[in-house]
Amino acid sequence: MNPSVLTPLALPKPPNAVDVSCHNLVKRFPDGTVALDDVTIECPPGGITVLLGPSGCGKTTLLRCVAGLETQTTGTMSIGGRDVSAVDAGLRGVAMVFQNHALYPDKTAEGNLAFPLRMAGVPKRERARRVAAIAELLQIDGLLKRRPGQLSGGQRQRVGIGRALIREPDVLLMDEPFSSLDAELRVEMRAEFLALQRRLGMTTLYVTHDQAEALSLADRMVVLRAGRIEQATSAEEMFRRPATSFVAGFLGGMNLLAGTLDDGTLRVPGHPHGLRLPALPANGSQNLTLGVRPEDLKPGPGGPDDLSFEITTMLTELLGRERLVHGHLGDRRLKVRVHADVPVGERLTVHAAAADLHLFDHDGARLPGAGD
C-alpha cells in the first residue's frame, strides 16, 4: 500500500460553498462529563464531512455545537470564515435534519415545508415558489397534500430534508437521518442524498455510526472516541491506513492480534515461524498489535513470505456469495471471508500477505510496516 497512489480528494466547490472550522473545542456538562476534549476539525467547502464513532463518543454533541444548539465550554468555530462561536443558532446559516424526521403531524407535507419560511416572514408567493421548487427537486410534488401519517418512512425523510434545504442554508447538518429506515430503503436514500448533495454542492456535516454509510458518503471522515479525534482524513486513506488500532478495529472490523517485534522479525501466536519485514526496525524488541482485515485472510498455508496460522471455526454467517467465518486462535477471535462453507469445529489454515498487514505500537499508534 503506497499512500502516494491514493486518489486525491476532489470536491465540488460552487461559488457559495463555505468551509466549517472548529478549533480546540471543549464541551463540559454541569455534572463534569467531558463530551468534547480539544477537538479541532476542518470541513472542506462543498463536501460531506462524516462524523463517525461509537455511542457516546461526542459526534452528535459536536454537530449540535456547530448548529448552536449546544454552547461549547471553550474553543472557537467559524462558518465561511465568520466566527460564530457566540452567534445564535438561527443566525448561523445552518439547517439540521434529525433522525426522527420531526414533522408536524397536523400539517401536510406542503405545510411542513413552508413552516420555516412562514416563521421567517417570507411572503406567501415566495413561500409557494420555494415549496414547489424543493418538492420537484426531491420528487415529492405529488405528496404535498398528505399528512406525515399518510407518508412512508422514506417520503417523510424526504420532507424532512426538504424542510432543511428550503431555508437555503450555507451548511447542512444531518444527525443519523436514515437510521430508522429499513436496510434496503436506507441504501436507496443515501444514494439519493449523495446525488442531491453533489448537485447542490452544499457543505454537509453528517453523523452516523454506520460504517458502510460513512464510507459511501464521506469526502472527509472524522472518527471520534471518548470526545477526542482518533483520525481525520479521506475515507479511502482511513480505511487503507488507519492511524490507530481503535480506528482499525472500528472501521471494517479488522482482526487484531497481540505480537512481538524482535530485531525486525514479527512473531504472533499460532505462526510457526517469525515473519521478517524489511520496513521494521532491525534492532530491539517491543510488544505490538498486528491487524489484518477479514477479506485479506485467505484459506491455505500461503508462501514463505506470508503470515499463516490455524484457527478453529466457531460459526459461519452467509453473506450471499461469501461466508464470514468466525474462529478463534488461542484466546483471540478472528473473522475470515471465504467462498466455501466451513463446518463448525473444523480447523482452517489461513494466510495473509505481508503487504496486507497493519502494525500498531503498545499505545495503539500506527507503525510503519510492509503495508505502507
Image: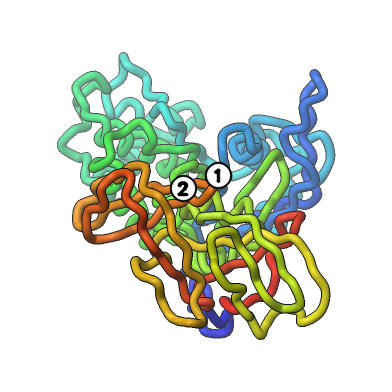
How far is disc 2 from disc 1 in space, using C-alphas? 7 Å
On the image, the x and y values in percent for residue 324 come to: 32, 51
On the image, the x and y values in percent for residue 239 come to: 51, 63
- Label 2 Cα neighbours within 10 Å, binned few <14 / some 14-19 / many ≥20: some
Q: Nearer the viewer, residue 186 or 199?
A: 186
Picture disc at residue 349: none
Residue 272 vertical position relative to residue 150 in the rendered view, above or below: below
CB under 8 Å between discs 2 and 1: yes
Left or right of residue 163: residue 332: right
Q: Nearer the viewer, residue 255 or 29?
A: 255
Q: Nearer the viewer, residue 77 or 50?
A: 50
| Residue at point 22%, 59% (across, down) | 340
| Residue, disc 1 | 331
Quadrant of residue 359 in the image?
bottom right
| Residue at point 57%, 56% (across, down) | 248
Residue 30 vertical position relative to residue 90 in the rendered view, above or below: above
- Label 1 Cα neighbours within 10 Å, binned few <14 / some 14-19 / many ≥20: few
Is residue 5 shown to the viewer in this render? Answer: yes
In the image, what residue type sits under mark 1?
Asp
| Residue at point 84%, 39% (across, down) | 74
Picture disc at residue 328: 2
Residue 59 vertical position relative to residue 19 in the rendered view, above or below: above
On the image, the x and y values in percent for residue 336 come to: 38, 56
